[in-house]
Amino acid sequence: MTFPSSAAGATGDWRSAIAARTALAALLASFALSGCYASHRLDSGPDACLPRAATMHRAAPAMCDHERPPGFPPEPGPPAACSSDADCTMDESGRCNGNSHDSWQCTYDACFADSDCSADSACECGGGFRADNNVCVIGNCRTDGDCASGFCSPTLGSCGDYFGTVGWFCHTCEDTCVNDADCVGLDGGFFGAPYCAFDPVSGRWGCQNTHCVG
């Protein structure tokens, strides 16, 4: 399995990693559907707050190209679901990706534009787990224009950059951080620096320092 940690190592396989990412997506989706993100409006009145500018944000909708480089053929030994790109025949984007740690599997582009995803998702170009396929990730915005704050930003999950971007969310007046630089000073542990991420439990952005290895 894959373990979140800021101080200890771990081993794992791609099945447990995918399961962890799926569980996180389900949690994010449950909050989106329950309306818990309704607070992404700005406060009003004389004490209204104006969130600081986010360094990473999306001004325009995703537009992914249709090109993928060749996959990586498996090394002899570990069991694999594919041995070459030729085994990935679901569509022309199929590539055989993996490594000796996670094994190999066929990966495909799930989207090329936000409109290819469900209403509560955005298209992440090249966002596949240890692959470069396009994937749909959960969120409450697709562009800055969807947010009262004017900033729709990509967030890492509770595993840090292990999975890469897991969603896109509006910044709000309730956030305790806006950029990773706001988290300097927080112990990031042996495996990486602290980072600013969206927390699906509190429904706001905050500093985190957990990382996954394996």
Image (tube, rainbow, N blue to C red):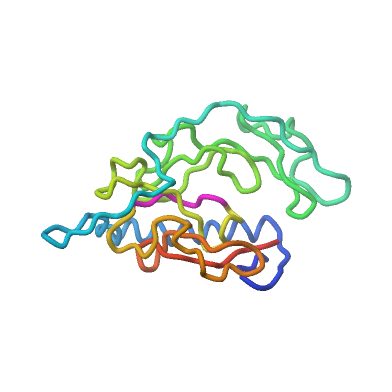
In percent of width and height, residue 52 lies at 32, 53
Instruction: Name the residue rendered at 37%, 42% in the picture.
Output: 142
The answer to which image quadrant residue 198 occupies is bottom left
User: Which of 159/191 is in front?
Assistant: 191
Q: Residue furthest left?
A: 45
Instruction: Name the residue rendered at 46%, 53% in the picture.
Output: 155
The range drawn in magenta is 164-170
Instruction: Name the residue rendered at 71%, 59% in the picture.
Output: 13
- Specify whether 40 is left or right of 60: left
Residue 60 higher or lower than 188, as above or below: above
Q: Magenta: predominant secondary structure element?
A: strand
In percent of width and height, residue 212 lies at 63, 63
In percent of width and height, residue 122 lies at 42, 42
User: Which of 61/28 is in front?
Assistant: 61
- Specify whether 126 is left or right of 40: right
Instruction: Name the residue rendered at 49%, 35% in the picture.
Output: 111
Residue 69 higher or lower than 198, as above or below: above
Q: Which quarter of the figure is the C terminus placed in?
A: bottom right
Q: Which quarter of the figure is the N terminus placed in?
A: bottom right
